[in-house]
Amino acid sequence: MISRDEKVDVATVGPLNRTAARQSWLRGQLRLWRRNKMATMGLLIVLAVIAMALLAPVIAPHDPYERDIRNRIAPPSRTHLLGTDNLGRDTLSRIIYGARISLLVGGVAVGIATLVGVPLGLLAGYNARRLDTAIMRFMDAVIAFPEIVLAIAILAILGPSVLNAMIAIGIVYIPVFARTARAPGLAESRKEYVEAARAVGASNARILLRHVAPNTLSIIIVRITTSLSYAILAEAALSFLGLSAPPPTPTWGRMLNEGRGFMELAPWVAVFPGIAIAITVLGFNLLGDGLRDALDPRYRNS
Amino acid sequence: MARYVVHRLIQAVGVVLLVSIFVFALIRLIPGNPVTIMLGENLSPDVERELVRKWGLDRPVYEQYVTWLVNLFRGDFGQSIRTHEPVAQLIATRIPATSMLAVGAMIIAICVGLPAGMVAAYKANSGLDYAAMLTALVGLCIPSFWLGLLLMLLFSLKLHWFPVSGYVSPLDDPGASLRHLVLPALALGVGLSASISRMTRSAMLDVLRQDYVRTARAKGLSEARTIFGHALRNAMLPTITVIGLQLGFLLGGSVVVEEVFSYPGIGQLLVFGISNRDYPLIQGVVMVFTLTFVLVNLLVDLSYAYLDPRIKYQ
């Protein structure tokens, strides 16, 4: 339960006293985090995974490509905390480095989806005539494809690679962002302050960018966070199918695929990368749910 | 009602046409000559010219599209480049396996998700509610292919309760067929049951707050009749939509889960098509998956309009 007064929306912060407003906004946010333990846990997981990806060379106990020939398919031990795979590569180090691909592909894909989808959605909501129909019908067609199937089809055209996996997953999520931005765009465009801005002679572009867009910000941030969890899952599935980063780059999905051939002998190769995926996805999900509770007015009192 | 149905049908046809343009463009968008991309560089120029003519690649693009679309409606999806069999036939022989998998996963998902969501809503904010929703959240985060591997590791390789992989037709041996189905269907159904239980819970919570539920209780109806007779019916509406939308997740998930269990379904055919650059096959599978998805969502929307009269006046 979060009451309205305790939350200062980014959009309602006036331009008059920015530093004071930002401080009280920060304080409000901090209070929210403390209140919402699940979201805090999500944030901690997300930060931990990001730190893992950034500091991989420092914290990884081994080189992820190094083959310890004498210790192939070795069970977890002191030298190899999570065991090794069939080539003698350290599972823990590969999982730590694998965070890089997951976050990179997930992040860039959601970035593409946001940068393309949000302007399209705002435009559709603001214009709300033929352009709206044209954009949204096109989005309907993209949504008509089952997610992974569309990503696979796009990768069939572009060929498997990290960059193409980002593009493919990005395209899949464009309609999600277009739809998310359209609804508030439509509602805001009909409010009095937009009317007022138009009356003083502001151009359409200015109204859209300076007045309508900022008011859709909170809902977009929530969508970005939850979409990251889905995008990371999608990347894992694609790299499991061998359609993301090429070997020997460590990715969680590929590690699972490589490990399943000898998982009866070495269950750790098939277990640990999956745990990494599940925890990361859980982190983004918890954070997204928490942000939604905090930022989305529809959930604020529930 | 008739107007709504017609409107919704026209919309679905429009979506299918747009989708078909995309799927058709699949081959055209690849940089380079489709013939050499699919068959390699070592073709003699004569053979290449012959194939270009045979596949109609020398005609204008819109003409190629119309021919392709007309053939599609006749059930002619072209020929697989690797196996030289008709794509439609390849897909058709695998429809039973994938349908069984999808239906099995759906049954598991509904049998687990619906009661869990109802109980969570009914006992809202209790320990039971939190436990159910935490389980659902975790269920959403587990990749289906990883769950498949874990199930296979435990129940097939260690305990030997179920076969490791493969498929047996129910016509040949219903028992063996079911044993082969259980693990893949579970791997696919768990994620689905999680989203169904979350949706059921929030829909049920909404409904339980309504005046007519209070009225039902006030006039002395038993708790069971209030829940099952009044609340559940209305709470089912959004849940049905979610189930329809989740079919896309199911079809996509079938691709990876079938790969894990070497289950000879349509999803595995797609993976085969990708690794062999068999573009007619990829086009066919993508088209069939998408048509199924569009059709099911059309049916969901229409049934929704039937169940909730307010929809059709919008």
Image: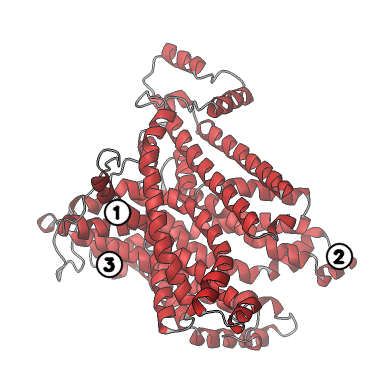
Q: Give the residue type at disc 1.
A: Val
Query: How dense is the environment of label 3, judged by Cα within 10 Å: few (below 14), some, or many (20 and up)?
Result: some
Q: Give the residue type at disc 2.
A: Arg
Residue most extreme to the left: A70
Residue A20 placement: quadrant = bottom right
Q: Nearer the viewer, mark 2 or mark 1?
A: 1
Residue tagged 2: A198
Q: Is residue B293 left or right of residue B91?
A: right
Q: Is residue B175 above or below residue A100?
A: above
- The tag on residue A60 is 3
Residue A117 at x, y percent in the picture: 62, 55
Q: Is residue B273 left or right of residue B260?
A: right
Q: Secondary structure at mark 1?
A: helix
Q: Are marks 3 and 2 on the same chain?
A: yes
Write the residue at 33% across / 65% down: A276
Q: Is residue A154 above or below residue B190?
A: above
Residue tagged 1: B182
Q: Secondary structure at mark 2?
A: helix
Residue A262 at x, y percent in the picture: 18, 52
Alpha carbon of mark 1 to alpha carbon of mark 3: how far?
39 Å
- The answer to which of A205 and B64 lies nearer the viewer is B64
Residue A122 at x, y percent in the picture: 70, 59
